[in-house]
Image: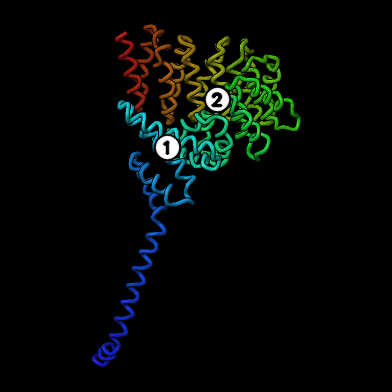
Amino acid sequence: MRPYLDRLGARRPWVSSVALSVVLLTFGTVVGCEVDVVPFNRLEIGRKFLAADESFQAATYFEESLEDEPSTRKVALALLALAYDRSAKKVLGIPSEYAKHRASRAKYVSEVRSDPEAIHFVVNALEDHNQSSKSAEEILVEMGGVAVPAIMQGYQTKPGERTLIRGMLRDIGSAAVPGIRDYLTGVSTSVQNRGQLVRLLAEMDNSDSRSLLVDLHADTAEAEGIRVEAASALYRLGDKQHRDYLTASLDAQDVHARRAAAYCMVYLNDEPDPAMLLAHLDDSDTVVATHIAAALGVHRSDLSAVDALVKILRNMDTNALGNAAVESLTRYGADAIDPVLEALKYDAKSEKWTRRQRLVSVISNPNVSVHFDKDQEFKLYEHWNERETREEVKGDIARLLEGLEGG
């Protein structure tokens, strides 16, 4: 042990000099890195402040980054537009401060507007799901057509934001149509994805959107689902010549075509043949069945639809379809009470108690419950007292009975 220490001692000056060199080298490296990464860190620190909705501090860091780090200029411009939008909202009640922050907002929004690449960073903020995301949405809609190419790229690459983006495109209006056309004709993506955009065009009633819809429907090389969506949108815009085409498409082999046709059944101006709708309530695709269930609540010329909708609730657990059936049944008022009471009676011992809950939600709706007579009220009490065993369902029925008694 001792000789080893002696040898180490003999080398101590060398070890110390090496250690000192390492320390100095490390210090120099840290200092050098400090200089190199400060602008990047400024940007990232600013992001953290913005995520916490501390927009005043965020703007300070972004402006320092804008000055010191040219490579992040486009990002900094986009983030500054968001930060000053949030800051202006916070000082809305202080006119002088509000004017100052709105002026800064206008400055950076203008710079972003003139730089297509910077607009993409505003689109990216939609995924943050915080207050600055709302600012990004408002700024992009305000920019209008100039922002649409970046928005459409976001539509392609950010599937989680597609519902939000469709709403933004709707707000932009006719200026968004050229970008939608480019997307529909130039981007390789699913029929469902494209079909949602075609459906959106029915909410943008202008010559550009109509022209695009006419072209899509007439294009025999186009997917059948897209052609039916286009016909559906045109019908909703008042072009009634497509009615027979749409009803015939309920029998299409292509599921997207059936979905588009079924979606349009709610909007039919004339009363459809109830048997036609009922024939498609058991479509193998639940999206089609859901649209048909909703249509049966709008077109109520055949009371046999009540039994069919109750059957859906007795046998299905799909949320969207179940909710559509409930909503439609509530529109039948008094005619829904007896079929629901019978279903509760015969399904009392079923382990699928959530189905009975949905049935109870139908007759609990004010549009239905107001029509209860004494005999029906007693039948409901009898079910609660003698047959129902699930506490959750018993609770819902008890609340309904209390309401009926109070009424």
Secondary structure at numbered mark 1: helix
Q: Earlier in the sequence, mark 2 or mark 1?
A: 1
Q: Of 173 and 119, which appears nearest the observer?
A: 119
Q: Position of residue 211 (x, y in %)?
A: 68, 23
Whether residue 265 is visible, yes or no, is: yes
Amino acid type assigned to the residue bearing label 1 in the image:
Leu
Q: What label sits on residue 82 in the rendered view?
A: 1
Q: Of 119 and 1, which appears nearest the observer?
A: 119
The answer to whether residue 348 is above or below residue 273 is below
Colour pattern of the rendering: rainbow
The answer to whether residue 209 is above or below residue 34 is above
Report crowding for label 2: few under 14, some 14 to 19, many 20 or more residues within 10 A (C-alpha).
many
The answer to whether residue 132 is above or below residue 15 is above
Q: Position of residue 115 (x, y in %)?
A: 54, 40
Mark 2 or mark 1, whichever is nearer to me: 1
Q: Residue at x 34, y 23 (%)?
A: 394
Amino acid type assigned to the residue bearing label 2 in the image:
Thr
Q: Which residue is mark 2?
A: 290
Q: Of 241 and 128, which appears nearest the observer?
A: 128
Q: Residue at x 63, y 35 (%)?
A: 183
